[in-house]
Amino acid sequence: MKALALLLAALVAGPGIAQDRGPIIDMHLHAFGFDEFGDPPPPNEITGLVPSARTDEAALRATIAEMQKHNVVLAVASGPLPDVLRWASVDPARFMGGAGVGPLDALPDVESLRRLAQDRQIAVFGELGLQYHGLSASDPAVAPYFALAEELDVPVALHTGLGGSGTAYGCCPKFRASLGNPAIVEDMLARHPRLRVYLMHAGYPYLAETKAILHSYPQVYVDIAALNWTLPRAEFHAYLKGLIDAGFGKRIMFGSDQMVWPDAIGLAIAGVEQATFLSPEQKRDIFYNNAAVFLRLDQATIEKHHRK
């Protein structure tokens, strides 16, 4: 594992790669304080590197520096609302605020969300980690959030798939792996045909169910965050190829799931770049084009991103 980590780090650090690949949109990044997981932060589980930031400002600057290094021009940043608003205020052109619901967060007040969205302080509802609270997106308790998102045409970023090992024994006794199955999102999707939704972590490991949802509900996209750097490379590539081979290459979006480890951004990018079964066009779709369509970016913004 250590040898693999060193190899990945070397590949990520290669010169000139950012300029060659074009701009990137990260649909899954977190605005966290430096001590979100403790002080000092724990090491990156893949590289073993301990983040150097020891203030919230330093953590933000380290993330921006890594984004600039790899030409990540835009990111959906979710997390505690004060952190999200702070990050967006520093670089509003780079960060789109996401109203997240993490493992330890209470569900937000619906009317507060309405005001934040109408004031354009947040642009996405999510990451919605409902699974950690023992809920599915089709649960009546969360129905008002999706109704509001459809009403205001705000995209929803929904956690699907798995959590950390032992989650139900630690922070979140209501967590169940089965609640990450995208199939149980279907009732909600059927009620909201105009709702833009993306399934974070691409529903892993529920490939068949993810393909069924993508086939049946054309407004649904996926991101591949965390899969692209935390899974064994062969496992990630097999899952990604399954989605590509099923014809969903135009609805797969890049994400890093960067939390307190800025080096995760480069590792996540390398995971896609090393997929030899992807054509250059398919990589560009994943890195930028699909997200630009999903977010409905205007032509002026797209041109600005490419000039960078």
Image (spheres, rainbow, N blue to C red):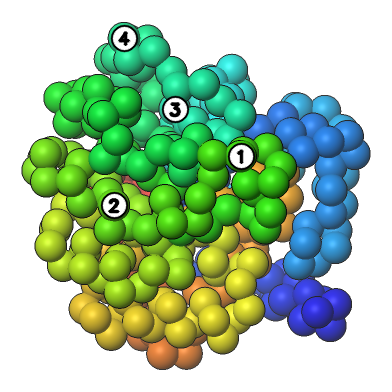
For label 2, the crowd category at 10 Å Cα-Cα, with few meaning under 14, some 14 to 19 and many 20 or more, is some
Q: CA distance from mark 4 to mark 3?
A: 13 Å
For label 3, the crowd category at 10 Å Cα-Cα, with few meaning under 14, some 14 to 19 and many 20 or more, is many
Residue highlighted by disc 1: 173
Q: Earlier in the sequence, mark 1 or mark 4?
A: 4
Q: Is residue 296 visible?
A: no
Q: Position of residue 127 (x, y in %)?
A: 45, 39
Residue highlighted by disc 2: 184
- Residue in the picture at 82% in, 28% down: 55
43 left or right, relative to 29:
right
Q: CA distance from mark 1 to mark 4?
A: 28 Å
Name the kind of residue labelled 3 in the image: Ala
Q: Mark 1 falls on what kind of element?
A: loop
Q: Position of residue 109 (x, y in %)?
A: 39, 13
Residue highlighted by disc 3: 99
Q: CA distance from mark 3 to mark 1?
A: 23 Å
Q: Earlier in the sequence, mark 1 or mark 2?
A: 1
Q: Is residue 52 visible?
A: yes
Q: Nearer the viewer, mark 1 or mark 2?
A: 1
Q: Are marks 3 and 1 in contact (CB under 8 Å)?
A: no
Q: Earlier in the sequence, mark 3 or mark 1?
A: 3
Q: Position of residue 145 (x, y in %)?
A: 29, 26
Name the kind of residue labelled 2 in the image: Ile
Q: Earlier in the sequence, mark 4 or mark 3?
A: 3
